[in-house]
Image (cartoon, rainbow, N blue to C red):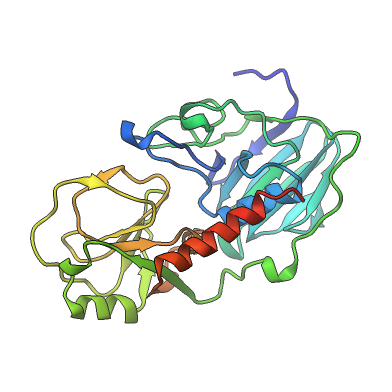
Amino acid sequence: MTHSKPGLLIEKPGFLSLIQDAGRRGVMHLGLATGGAMDRHAWAWANYLLGNCFGAAALEITFGQVEFVSQLNASIAITGAKVTVTVNGASQPLWATLSLKAGDRVTLGAPRAGLRSYLAVAGGFSVAAGLGNSCATLYREKTGGLHRDGQPLKAGDLLPCEPQSQNPPLQRQVPVDWIPDYREALILDVIIGAQIERFPSRSLECFFTQPYTLSPQSDRMGARLNGPALEVFGERLISEGISLGAVQVPANGLPIILLNDRQTIGGYPKLGAVTPRSLDALAQRQPGSQLQFRPVALYEAQRREKAFLNFFNKTL
């Protein structure tokens, strides 16, 4: 595919770099996943710093190791995983706006903490929306993304964007208090679900008191956990719709937290659902990280989510 617009030319795409926005809406009845940015906190801050709208497309970079050349004067922001960022070899801050000139070479190193970096450009990337009015990249379904085929970015891809305007965004930086420490102990909030009675009290006590470890088999579909196996009453269920963050317990008793690229239906019992705000934190933990769970009331989870959306839907 060729683009008439200049943009950011990818020379090293890293392990997994995907165009992601807020995800697709109104597609689950077709058996399609929602996709979207895994860590909305970091993704939303990258766009917010540049004055972009909440749903603007940005680049989600997993495990860093990316290099690109800007073909135009542009403002960008890089948030998320703690990586080394350089422009023409000079170190640059994270969680802040950066000004690029045409010909500048930008590199991201491997994460020292966290897993995913988010790179936004002022005005957003000019990538056509598809299903669900979204350009989110879904590799499993081979939909969305730069070429609308679900493929990760590769060397030679050009991310088209608008040149910096006459009035570029002000130099901004995220307050330190809003920058997460991805090495902190992780406790995930869980809203108890309707199938809670399928779990014996000893299983629930175990789930909410014992630590679990994030398995290397985790991906954008689900976070697989290693730790104490949970008992479940009864047989498998008739397949039903699955929500984001659902904690399903398969036959081996090891919980799986279903994420953005999850299947739309499933028949394993579900203990509840991890809240969207906790999923943002989970998205930055590397395999082998330890985590625990705690129950949270639905109204409290809704209050936190509403506060998050209200903040990032404001204009800076």
Can residue 109 be seen by looking at this rendering? no
Count of labels in the image: 0
Q: Nearer the viewer, residue 154 or 28?
A: 28
Residue at image coords 50%, 26%? 130
In the rendered image, the quadrant that contains the N terminus is top right
Residue 61 in view, yes or no: yes
Q: Position of residue 176 (x, y in %)?
A: 73, 69
Query: Residue sitting at 46 percent across and 28 percent down?
Result: 131
Describe residue 280's horizontal placement relative to residue 46 as left or right. left
Q: Position of residue 278 (x, y in %)?
A: 48, 64
State the residue in front, 159 or 316. Answer: 316
Question: In which image quadrant can residue 273 be found?
Answer: bottom left
User: Which x, y percent locates residue 280?
Assistant: 52, 59
Query: Relative to 247, is 106 above or below?
Result: above
Image vertical order of residue 20 relative to residue 252, above or below: above
Residue 213 higher or lower than 283, as above or below: below
The residue located at (53%, 64%) in the rendering is 304
Is residue 162 toward the left or the right of residue 170 in the image? left
The answer to which quarter of the image holds residue 192 is bottom left
Asked if residue 294 is positioned above or below residue 140 in the image, the reply reads below
Which percent across, then down, holds residue 302? Answer: 48, 61
Residue under the image location 52 percent in, 63 percent down: 303
222 lies left or right of 8: left
Name the outermost residue toward the front: 299
Q: Give the farthest residue toward the right.
A: 166
